[in-house]
Amino acid sequence: MVIDTKIPYSSASKEPLYARCVDPQEFWVPLIEKAYAKLHGCFEILNGGDMGEGMVDLSGGVSEEFDLTLPECRESLENGVFWKEMKKNLKNGYLVGCAKVQMTEDGKTEEGTGPNGITFNHAYGLLRMEDVTATEQL
């Protein structure tokens, strides 16, 4: 596949519309995203896509999803097993991501940000996990 370096950008901010590097002199993130968008047809198809599918596509690995609101996850969350496993996975080089899925009453994705600053329905990649005491969580 061949891609060019023409990236959609905002004329107001002079920044790429989609993914960008922190350092404006680096250009690899928008190029990877453009190649991925081209593979799937267009940039808009990537909006609201499946995080697990993207990780599999980019890494060649497999994906596993956990819905932390389900009762079957409750015990491993409460006894700390889930967090220990996630820390171990991250330490072993696995890609780990998370999202706060928020839907309206009619089943559409809700825009907004929660009380802790987490944007709803947005994928976050984890780079590290630290132990937090119960008092620090409050």
Image (cartoon, grey):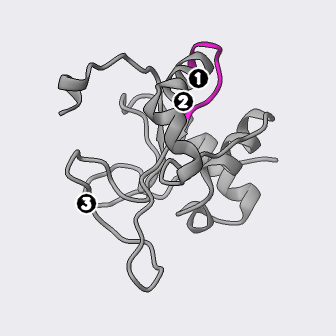
Which residue appears at 44% of the width and 86% of the height? 106
**First of labels 3, 1 by sequence position:** 3
Most prominent secondary structure in the magenta stretch? loop
Q: Which residue appears at 71% of the width and 57% of the height?
A: 38
Tell me residue 3's x, y (percent). 70, 48
Q: Give the range drawn in magenta.
A: 90-96
Circle 2 crowding by C-alpha within 10 Å: few under 14, some 14–19, many from 20: some
Q: Disc 3 designates what residue?
A: 12
- Residue in the foreground of this view, choosing between 42 and 71: 71
Q: Where is residue 128 in the image (x, y as percent from the top left)?
A: 44, 20
Secondary structure beneath label 3: loop
Q: Residues within 10 Å of mark 3 (few under 14, many from 20)?
A: few
Q: Mark 1 belongs to which amino acid?
A: Glu
SS at mark 2 in the image: helix
Q: Mark 1 points at which residue?
A: 85
In space, the residues marked 2 and 3 are separated at their CA atoms by: 44 Å
Residue neighbourhood size for the residue with mark 1, other residues' Cα within 10 Å, grouped as few (<14), some (14–19), many (≥20): few
Q: Is residue 18 magenta?
A: no
Query: Answer yes or no: do the residues labelled 2 and 3 have beta carbons within 8 Å?
Result: no
| Secondary structure under the numbered disc 1 in the rendered image | helix
> Is there a contact, CB below 8 Å, between mark 2 and mark 1?
yes
Question: Marks 3/1: CA distance?
Answer: 44 Å
Whether residue 131 is situated above or below residue 118 in the rendered picture: above
Residue type (three-letter) at the residue carrying disc 2 = Phe
Q: Where is residue 95 in the image (x, y as percent from the top left)?
A: 62, 29
